[in-house]
Amino acid sequence: MNKYFLATVVVFLLSLTDLWAQNNNFEGYLFAYFEGKGTGDKQEQLRFAVSQDAVNWKALNNNKPILNSKDISATGGIRDPHLLRGEKDGQFYMVATDMFTKKNGWDNNPGIVMLKSKDLIDWKSSVINLEKQYPKKFKNVKWVWAPQTIFDPVAKKYLVYFTVRFHHNTKLDFYSAYANKDFTGFEKEPILMYSAKDGAIDGDIIYKDGTYHLFYKGNTKDSEGKEIKNGIKQATSKTLKGPWKESFDYLDFYADKETVVEGSSVFKLNNSDEYILMYDLYANGKYEFQRTKDLYNFTKETESFTKDFSPRHGSVIGITREEAQKLNAKWGGVPQPLLINKDGLYHFEAKGNPIIDYKYTADPAAIVEGNTLWLYTGHDFAGGQKGYKMKDWCVLSTQDMKNWTEHPMPLDIKEFTWAKSGDAYAGHVEKKNGKYYWYISTNWTGIGVAVSDHPQGPFKDALGKPLLTNKDCFASTHSWACIDPAIYTDEKGQSWIFWGNRECYYAKLKDNMIEIDGEIKRMEFEGLDFTEAPWVHKYKGKYYLSYATGFPEKIAYAMADSVEGPYEYKGILNEIAGNSNTNHQAIVEFNGQSYFIYHNGAIQTDGGSYSRSVCIEKLEYNADGTIKPIIMTTEGIRK
């Protein structure tokens, strides 16, 4: 077989591999790593994280190990996990350094760990001790570091490669061997694969356009053998057997700087021609990356991952939505967009407060229809914000207050073309005449109303203009007076709208629900210190007006015999919500129990006054009809 024909076969087989990967419809990424912070005996453990975009990452299992190193390694620790999707065999392969530096130090580690799984959940493991299994060659081995695996399409076998150093020789070289069919060991004694001029560690091989690219941490030494520079380098070859051509250029941003890097890993972005070269800034506790399309030319500046963990040397593969959901069912933590089903629904179980912990939500409103409670919320776009950034709304439903479904985004601020503010502030949904009307506020551009035939939407602007503006807030002079609409429909079918900031306004709505009927009035009674967020409900013949008061806001309430009052102030219903200057309540009866729905800033990290979270508590009445103070809890509703 001539070399040209062999190269053609390799290119053809690998092109089929690329096509197979694309047809798997990868929509997310899985990161296998060990931890760089915390107590030493907990760091050298296998952990997983998931991302939708390969930049923003969430640790699974609350950043706890997904496997115990004591169960899979000889030393009690693992480092440098490398994860590989099998070649059309439905398997996943992982290898890792068998090393526990907290216990044994850095002087010696003679082997690696090999793992195999059908589903990324259950793993079978074995240990290879080169010193014991291949004493003729590796009796004097000092390190066996950072193993990785790649499929050889010519041999149709999995090649495992790793860095070796012997006690009698400080040179760091790459050795390799084919795994046996069970992926529990090697077919034969490992052989030298590649020897960089000045040594190398942490190799990662990737194939593109007829060439294998080996990325690794290399260095440059002077004539006396002293290291004068180090960083990420690469070698290339037309076959896995070599020969490998070493490039003496450094690829990483930090090669000419004091910052040191290692643990380079390269992966292709899903549905893209772009690749990511990531590396571990191990002395700085960071992970950064550069981009490339040809594996030769990389972006000049680095980018950082956003993450809730501190990874050390690891690897990334693409995963499907179904695989992400299986990982979440086992360990939790997968970003919510990957958990949405093909029908656009996301099902989850509330495990206390906040009930929604995968995104930031605020300003709740709720209605009950039959055996279903529908929850409508605002959507704070991100954590750690410095102001209100809200561009759309959310809708969720439940039948038991424990199991919830989030429906596709029902309403976007762009639906209201007149809302030049672009702010999707608090709203309230009311059913009337077989339709659902969503009254929303847009900061200084007024209150609008959208309509839908279904409680989950989608909703469309019903007016093409505001229903109410600051001009209707006759006792106010500030620009955000016309916000926070709330609707109450009485026994006769008359619907009322309440709204305002600093001053509380109310008016009747016409039966078409998109016009004000008559005079706009101002709510006044002794003790009223109104900030915003009015809500009206009725219980045993009494009307209750609750609202945010003061700043930071508490929730107060008053009672009356008529929806228009006069109201009698009854005091504070609940205190300042944790880590949030605002609060906004909804009160609703569902399945024989009354509930108080509110928001706080409790999600950590990055929750706060502009990154809020909806919570729920039970609401109970005293014998005289007054409401028992609401105690905010992390436990929330437990069924």
Image (cartoon, rainbow, N blue to C red):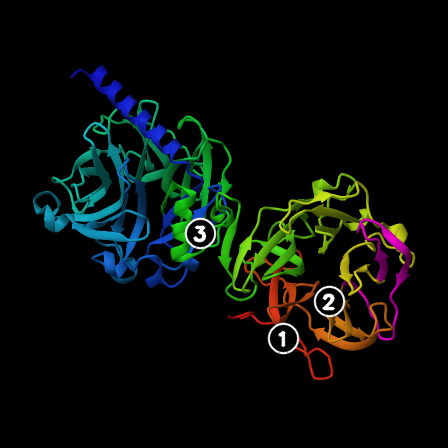
Q: Amino acid at mark 3?
A: Gly
Q: Residues within 10 Å of mark 3 (few under 14, many from 20)?
A: few
62 falls in the magenta region: no
Secondary-structure class at tag 1? loop
Position of residue 531 measured from the top left corner of the image (x, y, whole percent): 79, 64
Q: In this rendering, does residue 246 appear at all?
A: no
Where is residue 424 shown, x and y percent of the image? 71, 49
Q: What label does residue 285 carry, if any?
A: 3
Q: Earlier in the sequence, mark 1 or mark 3?
A: 3
Helix, strand or loop at label 3? It is loop
Residue type at mark 1?
A: Ile
Q: Nearer the viewer, residue 550 or 510?
A: 510
Foreground disc of the pair 2, 1: 1
Residue 553 marker: 2
The residue under label 1 is 631
Q: At x 15% / y 39%, what residue is drawn?
A: 190
Tag 2 secondary structure = loop
Q: Is residue 245 visible?
A: yes
- Residue 469 as seen in the image, left or right of residue 486: right
Kindly check if marks 2 and 1 are in contact, taking CB atoms under 8 A apart as contact: no
The CA distance from mark 3 to mark 2 is 39 Å
